[in-house]
Amino acid sequence: MPVTPSHISEPRFTTPAGEIIGWRDRGVVRATGIRYASVKRFCPPVDAPPATEPIDATQWSKAAPQNIEPELNAALGVSVDEFAACEEALHLSVTLPERSASAPRPVMMWIHGGSYVFGTADLPVFDTRPLALEQDVIVVGVNYRLGLLGFLGGYAGRPANLGLLDLISALRWIRINIAAFGGDPNNVTLFGHSAGGDAAAHLMIAEGAEGLFQRAIIQSAPLGLRHKRTKMHAKMALKAATIGHDTPLDEVLRVQTQVVEAAQGFGLKSAMPFAPQYGHYPLPKEKHAPAAWRRAAERIDILIGYTAEETALFLVLSPGLTRLRGMPLFGASLTGALVAATTRKVYKHDAHAFAHRHTKAGGRAYVYRLDWNKGRAPYGAAHTMELPLLLGEPESWREADIVKGVAAEELREQGSRLRKLWAEFARGGELSHAGQVESVIEWWKASQ
């Protein structure tokens, strides 16, 4: 992203949160790094009160505390320098076209992924400028607590699902303040990738989120890993209980690594040990979740999907599986079968089941499959592959391993098509064209 410039006539927004001073950037106006809530460790967020002084919204949002993931950094072309952390406050950033609008714009809230342990909304590769500028929408990127500080609780008197409560706090901020930016508070779409998509799905049934959004785009959510996690969480909690309110943050993150190790041995779900916990506020018990999703169907439209070769990303990142792939005669076929089976189990099967239940309950749902990059070594149409098309610009992704060798013009052209599709759904919850965008993506309206 460019360095934040200074301007003589900064854009200003008079909002219920206070007067917000933003900045201009190549056809868009940004208001970045806005504090939407304060947090204390192991406590629910406290919505930020109205500011008595102007809010300087010209710096990027700080990340939630997290351990660095070198392999994912390399895959996404992300630098360690982009993860300055803040534990005491939560931030969001607003991006909107600089041109005037004749009507309130649709609002899209971006929820980053990263297995609930990694990521931040304001990474250069997640730049929302192209989406906002091309599609005439307002995009709000949100940070939320991660790991054992955000998605492990129910022990030692500590609440669970704090990261979900953070996102609900952000939705409240949007509901109250977005009209001052020219946004429509009654036309809000969540779009999240991986853990972010999983969070969007669970916000559909979260107490306190009712009426705060009307649509959800659930991208590559590992819904197949969400079942029967109670025993694993209990084992994780034994390790996490050693952390106190005053434990230094470096020690918290060190223990988090031990907590992840404690989660091993529980099958595929061990690959994402942190996640929303059923039966803890604001979520129902797991056995009641399907009924809650059915009740939500008539008020929330969904677009849900996956990439054609989701788990190929993890194959490339695993030295052992990479060696298997390189074995003569059967290596390629074995790893191809493994990718197909795990993609189906973790992503595809539950995405279709989710959409089927939604339509049967009276809701509107579309299912998509992203095929772009299929057949290209080494990643193919792997997990995260839609992100270079939706967010950022070719320059943002220049260092990313997942798109090495892809021409900038191809990213621009195919990205423009995918952004148009996402924004069309955000505007009214429907997709009007035939169910294919050349070789990029296929979608179909889910039937009962």
Image (cartoon, rainbow, N blue to C red):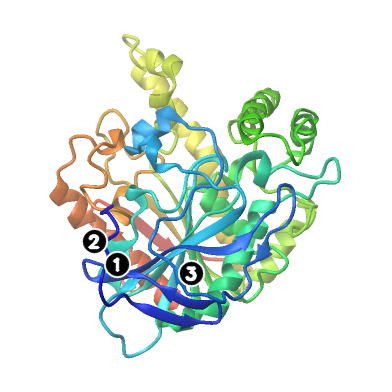
- Asked whether, in this view, residue 330 is left or right of residue 365, the answer is left
Q: Amino acid at mark 1?
A: Lys
| 256 lies above or below 395 | above
Under tag 2, what secondary structure?
helix
The residue pinned by badge 3 equals 189
Given this view, does label 3 or label 1 mark the residue nearer the observer? Answer: 3
How far apart marks 3 and 1 lie (CA) works out to: 14 Å
Classify mark 2: residues with Cα within 10 Å, few (<14), some (14-19) or many (20+): some
- Asked whether, in this view, residue 239 is left or right of residue 394, the answer is right
Classify mark 1: residues with Cα within 10 Å, few (<14), some (14-19) or many (20+): some
Between residues 10 and 383, which one lies in front from this camera angle? Answer: 10
Name the quadrant containing residue 298. Answer: bottom right
| 68 lies above or below 350 | above
Q: Earlier in the sequence, mark 3 or mark 1?
A: 3
Q: Amino acid at mark 3?
A: Thr
The C terminus lies in which quarter of the figure? bottom right
**Proximity of marks 3 and 2: CB atoms separated by less than 8 Å:** no
Q: Position of residue 248 (x, y in %)?
A: 66, 34
- Asked whether, in this view, residue 435 is left or right of residue 166, the answer is left
Residue at 25 percent across and 80 percent down: it is 99
Name the quadrant containing residue 57. Answer: bottom left
Instruction: In the rendered structure, find residue 420 and report the number of the disc placed on it.
Output: 1
The residue pinned by badge 2 equals 416
Q: Is residue 363 visible?
A: no
Between residues 102 and 268, which one lies in front from this camera angle? Answer: 102
